[in-house]
Amino acid sequence: MPVSVEPTSVDPSQNGSAPANAGAGAPADVTEAEALRPHAEDAFAGELAALAAQDDRPRPARWKLSPWAVATYLLGGTLPDGTVITPKYVGPRRIVEVAVTTLATDRALLLLGVPGTAKTWVSEHLAAAVSGDSTLLVQGTAGTPEEAIRYGWNYAQLLAHGPSRDALVPSPVMRAMADGMTARVEELTRIPADVQDTLITILSEKTLPIPELGQEVQAVRGFNLIATANDRDRGVNDLSSALRRRFNTVVLPLPETPEAEVDIVSRRVDQIGRSLDLPAAPDGLDEIRRVVTVFRELRDGVTTDGRTKLKSPSGTLSTAEAISVVTNGLALAAHFGDGVLRPGDVAAGILGAVVRDPAADRVIWQEYLETVVRERDGWKDFYRACREVSV
């Protein structure tokens, strides 16, 4: 027997208690302006609304936008009325098109890539554009229980009245099935293998049995699932072949060129800086290029000109880490400097990203400083700053 799942809400006036995160005098709800990091559908609500208003192409059932408009939202463009859609993902267009069309079929989508290739970022924006809600999320960890994917129980109701619809607590995946929306599972390979396989019936049969009630939840049209996984350390558990067959896998690559990576880092640092009320760094592009160059050379094991072979450290040195290093440097420049991003502001962050293994990585970093950075024209201040924090 199919069962409907309605969104659950808690009214503090009904139980006499305030939300757990509301302190004395604190507002019950956080507005978009107050949120440290608004959800994609809130942060880019204007762009999504503009796309919806001018999108006259066919839309799959319960999609907020057509596949073309979803791809435009992620890749950026200019609409006929002049509205500029900012790029959310800088990379091959075909990758985004394959990901979007996968969600328009009955196949689930697996975004695979090394750390820092924007898997979570792309997942969130896909869900926001397709369903208008990116919050139906299961965060994968080694301790993720089966209930996080299927359903749980309100134990007070369960003990008082036994198994019933009122006692059932739907998971984000169950809610997405019932409402025809997009669910997200982050770091799928970190979830225990037996819990991973809970998804097999959901993805193949599009149904979620509830044996305690003799019922089931059937997915309605519009439902799909986006999972992300790290192919560098492969998380904790590999996917079973049965589960992997239920996904269409899209590999997100590292940026192909230094210019593309500099563009990505610059955009994200600007977005994060504005959310943290950090002043824009007027001459920060030079330091961003240096950070990206260092990361790419150590990551690739060769200098940009191809003349010098390098040893690669144990860390991933991803684009996401470059963004973190530059953002931290911008904060240092704003609060303890003159507001101009300089080599001394990013040197410590680079050291922390490169030297993960204090023994082996430190030797690799020192060799790189002395054989490459020291001899590079225009990098003297950067060399001195890195030497100072490395001692």
Image (cartoon, rainbow, N blue to C red):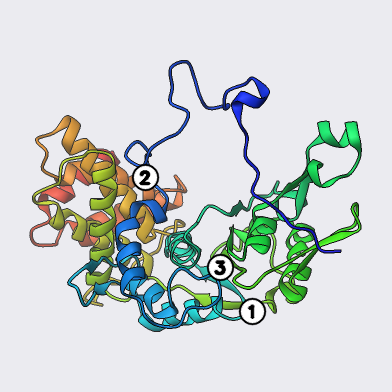
- What number of labels is visible? 3
Q: Relative to residue 233, is residue 309 drawn left or right?
A: left
To which residue does mark 3 refer?
231
Q: In what element is the residue under mark 1?
A: loop
- Front-most of 337 and 30? 30
To which residue does mark 2 refer?
352
**Kind of residue sitting beneath label 2:** Gly
Q: Nearer the viewer, mark 2 or mark 3?
A: 3
Q: Nearer the viewer, mark 1 or mark 3?
A: 1
- Front-most of 1 and 259? 1
Q: Quadrant of the N terminus?
A: bottom right
| Other residues around mark 2 within 10 Å, as few (<14) / some (14–19) / many (≥20) | few
- Mark 1 to mark 3 CA distance (whole Å): 24 Å
Picture residue at 67% right of the left edge, 63% below the top: 177
- Front-most of 86 and 190? 86
Residue 206 figure quarter: bottom right
To which residue does mark 1 refer?
106
- Mark 1 to mark 2 CA distance (whole Å): 43 Å
What is the x, y in percent for residue 178? 68, 61
Q: Quadrant of the C terminus?
A: top left
| Other residues around mark 1 within 10 Å, as few (<14) / some (14–19) / many (≥20) | some
- On the question of residue 309 being in view, the answer is no
